[in-house]
Image (cartoon, helix red, strand yellow):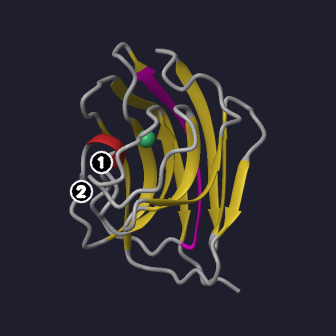
Amino acid sequence: MIWTRPLRPTRFTASFSIWMGEGNGADGMTFGMFEAAAELPGATGGALGAFLEPGLAIEFDTYQNIDIEEFVLELDGSPNHIGIDDTGTGTSFATSDDVPDLSCACWLPVEASFDCGRFEVSVDGRPPLVHAIDSFEPFDAVLAFTASTGGSTDVHAVGDVAIEVDESACP
Ligand SMILES: [Ca+2]
């Protein structure tokens, strides 16, 4: 799901619910701000429909990728984690395993925010994953949810979406 009108987000707050499951557990989804020129969806499988397209995203990853030759990816630390990602390179700035079973075939509420480079994301009320990106420079971006499957599959859905974007300058 892609909002096609480019924005120049410096801050956002987002609440939504994610639903993943009913398959054999892969690969996950993302919510992010992608450079306006990004061609979405991006690569499939462990790339979550986001990687190799430039942007910043929160990932909800349900599969531990072990093949580093297919994409320019670091190994996933676990088969059930969230992360703050540089989608262009497909690498995580930070990850957390402190999440419920993401592919529970149930709705999980997510609270996320972004403030001039500082991401914060929490799933189902767990302690948030927080990461501040050094020297964030605002860029023209489209907001999007992405998801993908590979050799394994799941249904990926999002609902109850409420997003507020602020484009005012960072200090
Ligand atoms: Ca993965």
User: Ligand 1, what quadrant?
Assistant: top left
Residue at position x 33%, y 23% in the image: 155
Q: Kindly state the secondary structure of the residue where label 1 is placed.
A: loop
**Residue furthest toward the right?**
127
Whether residue 80 appears in magenta in the rendering, the answer is: no
In the image, is 81 to the left or to the right of 70? right
Whether residue 12 appears in magenta in the rendering, the answer is: yes
Which amino acid type is shown beneath numbered disc 1?
Gly
In percent of width and height, residue 104 lies at: 52, 16
Residue at position x 74%, y 32% in the image: 125
Q: Is residue 117 above or below residue 97?
A: below
Foreground of the two, 40 or 71? 71
Q: Is mark 2 within 8 Å of ligand 1?
A: no
Which quadrant of the structure image shows residue 37? bottom left
Which amino acid type is shown beneath numbered disc 2?
Leu
Report the predominant secondary structure element of the magenta stretch: strand
Q: Is disc 2 surrounded by few (<14), some (14 to 19) or many (20+) residues within 10 Å?
A: many
First of labels 1, 2 by sequence position: 2
Q: Quadrant of the N terminus?
A: top left
Spatial CA span between label 1 and label 2: 7 Å
In percent of width and height, residue 135 lies at: 62, 84
Q: Is disc 1 surrounded by few (<14), some (14 to 19) or many (20+) residues within 10 Å?
A: many
Residue at position x 60%, y 84% in the image: 169
In percent of width and height, residue 94 lies at: 63, 57
In percent of width and height, residue 32 lies at: 45, 56
Q: Which residue is mark 1?
A: 49
Label of residue 117 in the image: none
Q: Quadrant of the C terminus?
A: bottom right
Foreground of the two, 40 or 2? 40
Q: Is residue 45 above or below residue 37?
A: above
Q: Magenta part of the protein: which range? A: 10-20
Q: Which residue is mark 2?
A: 40
